[in-house]
Amino acid sequence: MIVSLAEAKEWLTVDYDDKDNDIQLLCDSAEAYLFNATGITFDNTNPLAKLYCRVLITDWFDNNGLMTDKVSEKARFSLQSIMLQLQYSYTVDTTTTTTGV
């Protein structure tokens, strides 16, 4: 897991439990989105992957982007830049976790 529910709630500054299921869905979806875009399984030790998921989770939470399939213009540039780095700066090591080039 790249971003846990507790990390996401802290990042979003959510101190109530009413949205836990929604936030967990966003965490799972951000990780799946990143894997589908890169074909690489990242974990919580990769700071760019963690930041990417946090930005995506925040955008979806704040703008209900998960329902509209749109990323806000504010987040779009950052997400595109991070995605390019994650796609082309890491290789898949089939014996251990993903490592940087």
Image (cartoon, rainbow, N blue to C red):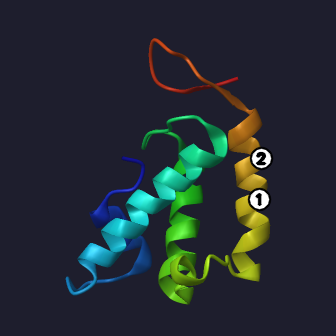
Of residues 77 and 71, the one nearer the viewer is 71
Q: Which amino acid does label 2 sit on?
A: Leu
Residue positioned 58% across, 46% down in the render: 36
Q: Quadrant of residue 4?
A: bottom left
Where does label 1 land, which residue?
80
Residue positioned 50% across, 36% down in the render: 41
Residue positioned 52% across, 77% down in the render: 66
Q: Position of residue 33 (x, y in %)?
A: 55, 55
Residue 77 is left or right of residue 79, and the answer is right
Q: What residue type is labelled 1?
A: Gln
Locate the C terminus by quadrant.
top right
- Label 2 packing within 10 angstroms: few (<14), some (14-19), many (20+): few
Above or below, comparing residue 81 to residue 26 in the picture: above
Q: In which quarter of the image is residue 78?
A: bottom right
Residue positioned 35% across, 73% down in the render: 23
Above or below, comparing residue 71 to residue 91 in the picture: below
CA distance separating discs 1 and 2: 6 Å
Residue 100 is left or right of residue 49, and the answer is right
Q: Position of residue 74 (x, y in %)?
A: 74, 80
Above or below, comparing residue 62 to residue 87 in the picture: below
Where does label 2 land, which residue?
84
Residue 40 is left or right of residue 24, and the answer is right
Q: Where is residue 20 in the image (x, y as percent from the top left)?
A: 25, 76
* Mark 1 secondary-structure assignment: helix
Q: Where is residue 68 in the image (x, y as percent from the top left)?
A: 60, 83
Q: Which labelled disc corresponds to residue 32?
A: none
* Mark 2 secondary-structure assignment: helix
Instruction: For the residues labelled 1 and 2, say whether their Cβ atoms are less than 8 Å apart.
Output: yes
